[in-house]
């Protein structure tokens, strides 16, 4: 076969490989028991070569999972060398420092054999229902209090499930049936990927995928180097302050572009927190590299070659490189802020490319009730529930920010009807929040307001750990910041943004999620766009007048004369 034909053939098989891992992820979503996996897609799925290099990832999933997993497989190979792997073996861990950052994430790794020969390794990760300990509460002082810590160990050997391990897992979970279902879903996910791969290999008459692996990594490395070569060379710095948990956190980054590699260093960032908001370096690398790729090479497939061109470093003992056994259960509060920090560096290097700041860390609503949550003597239905929601994204130079969109996590918002069906909770209100998007030539994405209570005459709790309450998303290029988030009771009293907050019987919780920052001067926004924003309820008539200098008449139409006068001032 000619070299040109081989290139075309390998490209076709590469596309096929992506469909293989997408089916792997969809299998996990279809059969998982956890709502956050089944409904929100809080997972990752990918295929690795026999050296542990990521070749393809599923589109479904989160960058925090897949980019962490890309580094983690080599840790599994250290414990279980490829020459000792057998057909039917399955390995499991939730080690935050060798996986995806906290104990809730189970990573399952399965070697795949074809005609008796190891040809690839499939891996998937899912956020499981419950793993004991203090769970989502960041008040634990070390990882041991956060739940059951599982090192890299066999989940199955030669096709036989490790029943002793399963008993330990189920004995340490408040929801053992859901956990057991999630574990088997993870196993099934890798099996589905392996079956599709071997079927593909039979179709293309392949004994190995070594040549395909080399093609993918070589082509990706070349494309990434070409993308980096187009960037300016030099060093730029940026910092942001976020709410943290009890105290504010400073995130500092230095971007260096040398021509073939992009370096991000976090020197100057706040030290490790005593609360569980710390990031292991793998999770820091995951979201930092995602932010870089969004700007530098958004259309390139994500794999080991692309990620290797992004080098992330941080001093040990900082909140973005927390040493074992620091508490890490809420590491997303820090990690999901890192793309915005990275964008701030790139905006200095390449003005007019980076979006304004957005909500960042998802406003995931973690609810619960029962003696261990709302106190002894509790009478009502005990439950734990997580409902992914979000505020707005920052404005882009080409369009307004997206409303109520969980960037950069990539998870989907969970339907409130799902939570109502599984718990006694009732959602009385869920609507976009007027005037929450930062004013600008391009408006920031809107946050949302959610009001929730319970059908029972019993208290319920929210595990609060929200960002952008004290320090809202900043605008860029003259744009205004987005609205800050807030928590309150329907009766009017405010409540804290962090810690377990108990809502009394008969009371309702009101959650106002933050908006994204605006981009460019508000007075330069198209007048018709402002008129439409007011008509849609995104912007109030008062804000249109005060911020955008657009005056509307009683009929909601632009008062041309008064608007022209205001914009000239």
Image (spheres, rainbow, N blue to C red):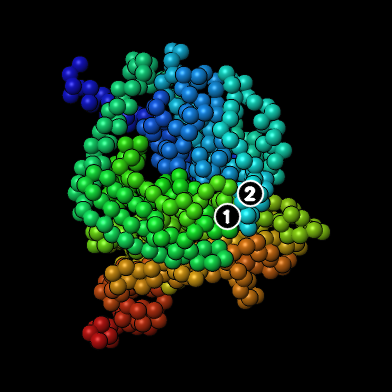
Please determine whether, in this image, residue 544 is positioned above or below residue 264: below
Residue placed farthest to the front in the image? 316
- From the top left corner, tell me how far across and down residue 137 is, in percent: 63, 55
Residue placed farthest to the top in the image? 115
* For marks 2 and 1 on the same chain, the one whose residue lies earlier in the sequence: 2
Q: Nearer the viewer, residue 39 or 296?
A: 296
- From the top left corner, tell me how far across and down residue 413 is, in percent: 50, 53
**Which residue lies under the disc numbered 2?**
146
Please determine whether, in this image, residue 35 is positioned above or below residue 449: above
Q: Nearer the viewer, residue 231 or 75?
A: 75
Residue placed farthest to the right in the image? 377
- Name the residue: 59% across, 21% down: 157
**In terms of secondary structure, where does tag 1 sit?**
loop
- Name the residue: 39% across, 57% down: 267
User: Are circles 2 and 1 on residues that touch, CB within 8 Å?
Assistant: yes
- From the top left corner, tell me how far across and down residue 211 is, in percent: 30, 22
**Which residue lies under the disc numbered 1?**
276
**In terms of secondary structure, where does tag 2 sit?**
helix
- Name the residue: 28% across, 77% down: 523
Q: Is residue 60 left or right of residue 425?
A: left
Q: Is residue 30 visible?
A: no
Q: Is residue 25 left or right of residue 375?
A: left
| Distance between mark 2 and mark 1 Cα atoms | 9 Å
For residue 505, what is the image quadrant?
bottom right
Q: Nearer the viewer, residue 15 or 416?
A: 15
């Amino acid at each position: 076969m000619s070299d040109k034909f081989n290139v075309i053939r390998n490209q076709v098989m590469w596309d096929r490989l992506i469909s293989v891992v997408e089916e792997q992820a969809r299998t996990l979503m279809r059969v998982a028991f956890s709502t956050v996996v089944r409904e929100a897609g809080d997972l990752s799925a990918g295929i690795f070569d026999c050296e542990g290099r990521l070749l393809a990832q599923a589109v479904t999933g989160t960058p925090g999972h897949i980019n962490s997993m890309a580094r983690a497989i080599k840790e599994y190979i250290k414990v279980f060398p490829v020459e000792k792997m057998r057909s039917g073996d399955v390995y499991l861990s939730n080690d935050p420092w060798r996986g995806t950052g906290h104990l809730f994430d189970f990573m399952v790794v399965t070697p795949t054999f074809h005609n008796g020969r190891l040809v690839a390794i499939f891996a998937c990760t899912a956020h499981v229902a419950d793993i004991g300990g203090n769970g989502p509460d960041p008040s634990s002082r070390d990882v041991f209090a956060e739940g059951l810590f599982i090192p890299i160990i066999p989940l199955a050997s030669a096709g036989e499930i490790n029943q002793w391990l399963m008993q330990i897992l189920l004995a340490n979970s408040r929801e053992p049936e859901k956990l057991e279902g999630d574990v088997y879903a993870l196993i099934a996910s890798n099996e589905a990927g392996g079956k599709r791969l071997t079927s593909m290999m039979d179709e293309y008459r392949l004994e190995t995928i070594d040549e395909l692996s080399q093609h993918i990594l070589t082509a990706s490395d070349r494309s990434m180097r070409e993308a980096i070569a187009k960037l300016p060379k030099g060093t730029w710095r940026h910092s942001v302050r976020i709410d943290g948990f009890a105290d504010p956190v400073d995130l500092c980054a230095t971007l260096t572009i040398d021509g073939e590699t992009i370096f991000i260093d976090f020197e100057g960032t706040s030290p490790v927190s005593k609360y569980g908001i710390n990031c292991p370096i793998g999770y820091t690398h995951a979201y930092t590299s995602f932010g870089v790729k969004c700007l530098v090479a958004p259309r390139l497939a994500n794999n080991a070659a692309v990620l290797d061109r992004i080098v992330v470093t941080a001093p040990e003992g900082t909140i973005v490189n927390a040493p074992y056994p620091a508490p890490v259960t809420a590491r997303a509060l820090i990690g999901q802020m890192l793309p915005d920090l990275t964008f701030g560096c790139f905006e200095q290097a390449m003005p007019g490319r980076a979006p304004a700041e957005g909500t960042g860390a998802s406003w995931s609503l973690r609810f619960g009730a029962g003696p261990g949550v709302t106190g002894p003597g509790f009478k009502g239905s005990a439950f734990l529930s997580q409902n992914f929601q979000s505020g707005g994204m920052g404005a882009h130079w080409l369009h307004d920010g997206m409303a109520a969109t969980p960037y950069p996590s990539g998870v989907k918002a969970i339907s409130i009807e799902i939570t109502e069906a599984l718990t006694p909770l009732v959602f009385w209100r869920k609507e976009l929040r007027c005037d929450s998007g930062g004013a600008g030539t391009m408006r920031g994405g809107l946050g949302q307001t959610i009001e929730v209570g319970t059908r029972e005459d019993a208290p319920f709790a929210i595990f609060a750990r929200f960002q952008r309450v004290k320090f809202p998303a900043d605008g860029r290029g003259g744009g205004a910041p987005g609205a800050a988030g807030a928590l309150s009771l329907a009766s009017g009293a405010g409540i804290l943004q962090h810690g377990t907050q108990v809502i009394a019987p008969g009371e309702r919780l009101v959650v106002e999620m933050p908006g994204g920052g605006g981009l460019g001067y508000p007075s330069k926004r198209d007048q018709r766009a402002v008129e439409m924003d007011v008509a849609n309820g995104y912007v109030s008539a008062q804000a249109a007048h005060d911020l955008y200098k657009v005056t509307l008449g009683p009929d909601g139409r632009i008062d041309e004369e008064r608007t022209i006068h205001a914009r000239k001032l």
